[in-house]
Image: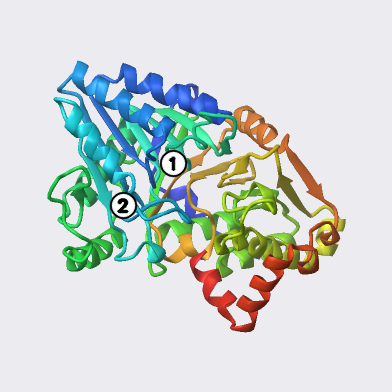
Amino acid sequence: MIARRNPFDQLPTIAQDPNKFTILFSAAEFRTRLIESIRNASKRIYLVALYLEDDEAGREILTELFEAKQRNPGLEINICVDWHRAQRGLIGKAASEGNAAVYKKFNQDYKHQIPIYGIPVRGREVFGVLHLKGFVIDDTVIYSGASLNNVYLHYKERYRFDRYHAIENAALADSMVTFVQEEMLAHPAVNDLSAQDKPTTKDIKTDIRQFRSSLAQASYKFTPDNIPQDQIGIAPLVGLGKRRNRLNQYIVQLLAQAKDEIYICTPYFNFPNSVAKEVKKALKRGVKVHIIIGDKTANDFYISPEEDFKTIGGLPYLYEINLRRFAKANEANIASRKLSIHLWKHDDNSFHLKGIWIDKRYMLLTGNNLNPRAWKLDLENALLVKDDHHHLAEQFDKELENILQYTQLVCTYRQIQKLEDYPDVVQRLVRKITRVKADRVLKQIL
């Protein structure tokens, strides 16, 4: 048999000192590190997130940013959030001007202003959002799937659990900043949300189409390094759309390379077909597969039965139906321990982890949910860590141990609730969706 060529042997990467690669283990630690980094910044701050919320934690971050700018007017600060998400209220709440209102107020209240850019990946939010991740502060990249609000930053009692990594690397930071400057901020579709005369979505409809086309061909620019044995390699990756999406291609190739063990984290169990196929192939060739997902009650869309039900609250049940179907089809693999499904639940906190570990050699840090929406609609990125000499093995073992501490192992698909166990209102909703065959459409945008 001819040995399969490893596409990652030739992958261009940036050299990284493993001693300057730090894993943070909680939302509270992430918040502390982010605030300290903002306070100590001397040359630049670039924050990119789905949203920066108008709540206590969001305003705390804005205050830190604006105070840093007043202390050092030459400090370069740019914030990027999704254009649509920033200009609406929360799902299920009354209509409002959204987070853009607080951005405008901060810029009115301070002498030295900070642009807060809206990034319109598509003409409508449902068909694509800014899901790019990475906060660059001076020469450090703080990478997480988290957005900026109370629950992501554990400002009050509840937290939303994610992954958090701090990487000191000037070349990586420069590459990510250059992407934001050249591929996003330079485009006419991108506008400052705090400006008094910002355009409407309709005004920039043509620009948005051109912007999306441009983003679909964009990539991170950097000079590749030869990686010495005492270092690791990091490849920043980006992808948008279902055609020629290099991030998607690399994820599929990663899974195909696995020889011993795969760990996959996703908050929403709805694999794209290509990922599902590679997981199936991996199980067939004897690779141990571990899937870590949130219990439906740890889903950020979950609504407790005691509260008023809204249609959006059906999503966690749809994901669980997918999971039960998958577990039932793989009952033999579960019984033989080839497949392990870990359900995360910790009090009333929520789960938002994403990522892949392959044979303790490759680790993918990403905000990609590994679902059809991420695969086709949203602008996604990732940092692929290539650790041929296992410098980070101990750190990543600790990270996995930290993630798994609040999980329960699924020993049979029967542990997972079936439709008949759900509240009546959920049963009616799911049956209605299935009857009109809307579930097929929903799977492509959720």
Residue 216 sits above or below residue 42 on the image: below
Residue drawn at (49%, 28%) of the image? 30
Q: Which of marks 2 and 1 is nearer the N terminus?
A: 2
Residue drawn at (76%, 68%) of the image? 419
Pinpoint residue 181: horizontal percent, then vertical percent.
Answer: 21, 44
Q: In this view, does 170 lie to the left or right of 334?
A: left
The amino acid beneath tag 1 is: Ser
Residue drawn at (67%, 61%) of the image? 317
Whether residue 292 is visible, yes or no, is no
Categorize mark 1 by other alpha carbons within 10 Å: few (<14), some (14-19), many (20+).
many
Q: Nearer the viewer, residue 384 or 375?
A: 375
Q: Which of 328 and 226 is in front in this view?
A: 328
Q: In this view, does 280 lie to the left or right of 256?
A: right
Instruction: Name the front one of labels 2 and 1.
Output: 2
Pinpoint residue 349: horizontal percent, then vertical percent.
Answer: 63, 39
Pinpoint residue 306: horizontal percent, then vertical percent.
Answer: 69, 51
Question: Quadrant location of the N terminus?
Answer: bottom right
Pinpoint residue 300: horizontal percent, then vertical percent.
Answer: 57, 49
**Mark 1 residue element:** loop
- Marks 2 and 1, Cα distance to the nearest angstrom? 16 Å
Instruction: State the mark number for residue 147.
Output: 1
Rendered image quadrant of residue 436: bottom right
Categorize mark 2 by other alpha carbons within 10 Å: few (<14), some (14-19), many (20+).
some
The amino acid beneath tag 2 is: Gln
Residue found at the far bottom of this picture: 436
Instruction: State the mark number for residue 74.
Output: none
Instruction: Look at mark 2 in the image and give the residue it sits on.
Output: 87
Q: Is residue 336 left or right of residue 381?
A: right
